Amino acid sequence: AQTVTQSQPEMSVQEAETVTLSCTYDTSESDYYLFWYKQPPSRQMILVIRQEAYKQQNATENRFSVNFQKAAKSFSLKISDSQLGDAAMYFCAYRSAKGVDGLTFGKGTHLIIQP
Amino acid sequence: DTGVSQDPRHKITKRGQNVTFRCDPISEHNRLYWYRQTLGQGPEFLTYFQNEAQLEKSRLLSDRFSAERPKGSFSTLEIQRTEQGDSAMYLCASSLGGAGNQPQHFGDGTRLSIL
């Protein structure tokens, strides 16, 4: 079974600074998908960014980018120019390219933005 | 696109009672997922439908849990003889079929509290 580990329960960053959230995963599969989701307090889970394992190029969405290291099974999220609205729980998630179709989530990282 | 809708938002019940939750996915999405999220944890996959067919069930889905998706539209999740350990947020998500990188869109969730 796949596992996803987020080793930082909480991170704090000054507004306008850059922060990196860590995620590692364990799998024996070669083809899979990785996602970062954001869950603001009492609000819906929202997709931030996604990465296909077969793509070597790191995904980027505006201020959000990932550092995907397939051999190391690492998938970190970098948030540039942090904004107050970025404050939320961030979850890293894994999805197999075959078999069970549900996402496997990490425990999350609580991101605090200091004004 | 009205988003994924879940009802009710909150449910408080006594131990031993049965509860039923409803999820209305995004209209063109043929895939529907149920997750459970306890405090301080990431969501855990429960089950998945493609159209009206329930294709995967997690080991977490005990025989007290049953899910349906008649006619491939809305879905219901029923918990019979509720226990204290069932207290959690129950999340529904939907996605388009096809490639595995299709994002899952989440609802606001139903928070279940067992007295």
Image: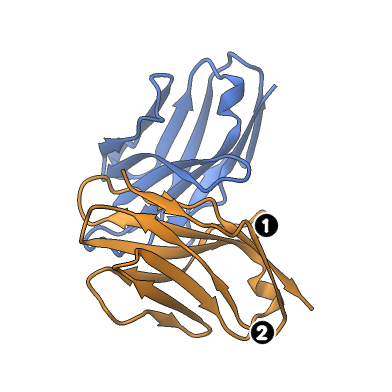
Chain colours: A orange, B blue
Kindly indicate whether the residues beneath marks 1 and 2 are on one polypeptide chain: yes
The first of marks 1 and 2 along the sequence is: 2
Task: Please give the name of the residue rendered at 51% of the width and 66% of the height, measured from the top-left corner.
Answer: A22
Disc 1 marks a residue whose amino acid type is: Pro
Task: Please give the name of the residue rendered at 32% of the width and 42% of the height, measured from the top-left corner.
Answer: B48
Residue B98 locus on image (x, y percent): 21, 61
Q: Is residue A48 above or below residue A103?
A: below
- Is residue A38 visible to the viewer in this orientation of the structure? yes
Residue B31 locus on image (x, y percent): 31, 50
Q: Which residue occupies the extreme right position in the image?
A: A115
Residue A1 locus on image (x, y percent): 31, 43
Nearest the viewer among B86 and A14 is: A14
Nearest to viewer (mark 1 / mark 2) = 2
Disc 2 marks a residue whose amino acid type is: Glu
Label pair 1/2, CB-CB below 8 angstroms: no
Which label sits on residue A41? 1
- Dot 2 corresponds to which residue? A17
Q: Is residue B37 left or right of residue A95?
A: right
Residue B100 locus on image (x, y percent): 26, 60
Q: Based on the displayed image, in which of its 4 quarters is residue A89 positioned?
A: bottom right
Nearest the viewer among B57 and B94 is: B57
Q: Is residue A67 above or below residue B103?
A: below
Judged from the image, the secondary structure of the residue bearing numbered disc 1 is loop
Q: Based on the displayed image, in which of its 4 quarters is residue B57 positioned?
A: top left
Where the C terminus of chain A falls, by quadrant?
A: bottom right
Q: Based on the displayed image, in which of its 4 quarters is residue A52 positioned?
A: bottom left
Callout 2: residue from which chain? Answer: A
